[in-house]
């Protein structure tokens, strides 16, 4: 391949539980961009491609931010698709480098949502939410995912003690991540003692809203040091047109093609970064992407995730590290790149050489509409 | 109060809610209206609404035919209509047949 794209840098601008006044969205995007460039041994002057995802950049767009950063990019993108935004941007950035449209691309995402801004985002997430859900005095996505979680529990005979494996196991990983906002140990007993506020969901099933940012740097090969190469990536939107039962997702439709294109099988994966807006969605992605080979969710949750502490969302995921708005879509990708490049703190280093990253989101009416997944490998 | 109605594709009969621009089954973009006065309550949750007061929300599968070509990638029983999110009034429980009404833009469901 004439121009082979590699991910050569990744950075997370520190997440903060309560939106600070001194770091707004632009500052967080700057911090993430500069951090990722420093990680790659590059500077703003090397950048000729730039992509942004943020719910709170308005009224500015990618071109404003590029201007404020002094960039004159040949390639510029913005993606508003929340949990799928990072991999969406990534898919386009890979093609841009392959085609020679850009050589060094920064993809940055950040959000700084105070209480009012977050409430407005939830209430006016899309037209259907504003017109059809808001009039119900709707409780936000928690209510929709409570319904979906209940449906899963009924259909697959799961209890809170099964799905609780995800927040509990991820918290153990978060304890080894100084950037996670919740690091205190969490036991299954603690989880089961936490009363559901929107049954069957309790607060530990919901992501803490944070202010923060994430960024990666892509560059045409060769790389100076260890890098992450995207072996394959697939996307699908509106797989069920919001009409399905939610027990399968669009990931089921792309999985076979993804693994085939990656020349790998699910059991070859050393670590997985599944979009964890709610525990049930981690399970749904794991099943549909083939990580639960015997199809037994109870065994996977109880043995693989909880007992074996298999490398799943090793940052602690959004459930413990926090969800920085649209940057939630890049959180897992940054951790995957850091694991593959060997730049995470030693306490949680997995030595992973092959990782799966999934993006999910954009709740249009009943559940997420956007699905994308990538298989990444370490090179160099 | 008139019965709740939903759009159905003028070409293939696929019923949808909320209204959209084109039929996800056949691609036609003309609609008729079909009555959808009742449905089956599938699941319910209760918790704080926007204003902090408790809300009860549920998924209701409308009792209207999906149309000749059936649902898309849907493992639910065939021959049932689209799933909708409704505010649940009274003591309706999963499995109950509920009656739907659109009240000031809010879709409400209560036991028949």
Image (spheres, rainbow, N blue to C red):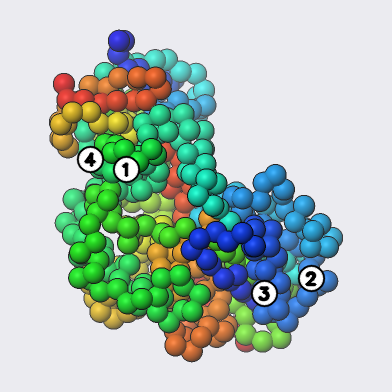
Q: Position of residue A273 (x, y in %)?
A: 45, 69
Residue at x 59% of width, y 50% of height: A55
Q: Report helix, strand or loop for mark 2.
A: helix
The CA span between labels 4 and 2 is 52 Å
Q: Report helix, strand or loop for mark 4.
A: strand
* Residue A29: quadrant of the picture: bottom right
Subunit of label 1: B
Q: Position of residue B51 (x, y in %)?
A: 38, 38
Q: Is residue A133 visible?
A: yes
Residue at x 40% of width, y 29% of height: A135
Q: In this rendering, which labeled residue sits more in front, label 2 or label 1?
A: 1
Callout 4 and callout 1 share a chain? yes
Mark earlier in primary sequence (2, 3): 3
The CA span between labels 2 and 1 is 46 Å
Q: Which mark is residue A44?
A: 2
Circles 4, 2 touching at the beta carbon (< 8 Å): no
Callout 2 and callout 3 share a chain? yes
Circles 4, 1 touching at the beta carbon (< 8 Å): no
Reading the image, the residue beneath label 3 is A35
Q: Which mark is residue B43?
A: 4
Question: In this orientation, which residue lies closer to the viewer: B59 or A118?
Answer: A118
Q: Report helix, strand or loop for mark 3.
A: helix
Reading the image, the residue beneath label 1 is B48
Residue furthest to the top: B1
Q: Position of residue A159 (x, y in %)?
A: 18, 59
């Amino acid at each position: 391949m004439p121009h082979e794209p590699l991910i050569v840098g990744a950075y997370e601008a520190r997440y903060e539980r309560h939106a600070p006044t001194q770091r707004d969205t632009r500052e967080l995007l700057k911090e993430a961009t500069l951090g990722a460039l420093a990680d790659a041994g590059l500077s703003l002057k090397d950048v000729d491609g730039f992509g942004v995802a943020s719910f709170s950049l308005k009224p500015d767009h990618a071109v404003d931010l590029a201007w404020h950063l002094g960039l004159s990019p040949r390639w510029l993108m913005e993606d508003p698709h929340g949990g799928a935004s990072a991999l969406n941007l990534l898919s386009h950035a890979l093609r841009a480098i392959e085609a020679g449209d850009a050589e060094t691309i920064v993809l940055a995402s950040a959000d700084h949502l105070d209480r009012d801004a977050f409430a407005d985002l939830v209430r006016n997430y899309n037209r259907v939410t504003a017109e059809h859900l808001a009039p119900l005095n709707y409780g936000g996505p928690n209510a929709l995912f409570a319904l979906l979680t209940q449906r899963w529990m009924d259909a697959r005979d799961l209890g809170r003690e099964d799905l609780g494996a995800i927040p509990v196991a991820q918290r153990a990983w978060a304890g080894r991540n100084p950037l996670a906002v919740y690091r205190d140990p969490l036991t299954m007993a603690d989880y089961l003692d936490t009363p559901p506020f929107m049954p069957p969901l309790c607060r530990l099933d919901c992501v803490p809203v944070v202010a923060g940012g994430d960024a990666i740097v892509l560059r045409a090969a060769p790389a100076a040091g260890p890098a992450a190469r995207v072996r394959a990536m697939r996307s699908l939107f509106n797989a069920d047109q919001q009409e399905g039962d939610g027990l399968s997702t669009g990931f089921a439709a792309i999985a076979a093609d993804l693994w085939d294109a990656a020349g790998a099988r699910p059991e070859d994966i050393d670590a997985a970064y599944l979009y964890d807006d709610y525990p049930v969605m981690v399970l749904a992605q794991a099943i549909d992407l083939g990580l639960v080979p015997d199809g037994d969710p109870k065994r996977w949750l109880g043995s693989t995730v909880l007992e074996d502490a298999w490398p799943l969302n090793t940052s602690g995921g959004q459930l413990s590290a926090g969800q920085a708005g649209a940057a939630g879509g890049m959180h897992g990708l940054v951790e995957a790149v850091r694991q593959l490049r060997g730049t995470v703190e030693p306490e949680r280093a997995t030595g992973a050489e092959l990782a799966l990253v999934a993006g999910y989101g954009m709740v249009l009416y009943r559940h997420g509409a956007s699905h994308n997944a990538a298989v990444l490998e370490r090179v160099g | 109060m008139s019965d709740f109605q939903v759009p159905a594709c003028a070409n293939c009969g696929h019923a949808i809610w909320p209204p959209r621009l084109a039929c996800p089954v056949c691609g036609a973009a003309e609609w008729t209206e079909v009555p959808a006065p009742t449905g089956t309550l599938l699941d319910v949750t209760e918790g704080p609404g926007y204003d902090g007061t408790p809300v009860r929300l549920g998924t209701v599968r409308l009792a209207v035919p999906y149309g000749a070509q059936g649902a898309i990638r849907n493992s639910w029983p065939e021959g049932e209509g689209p799933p909708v999110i409704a505010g649940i009034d009274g003591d309706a429980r999963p499995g109950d047949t509920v009656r739907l009404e659109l009240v000031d833009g809010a879709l409400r469901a209560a036991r028949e």
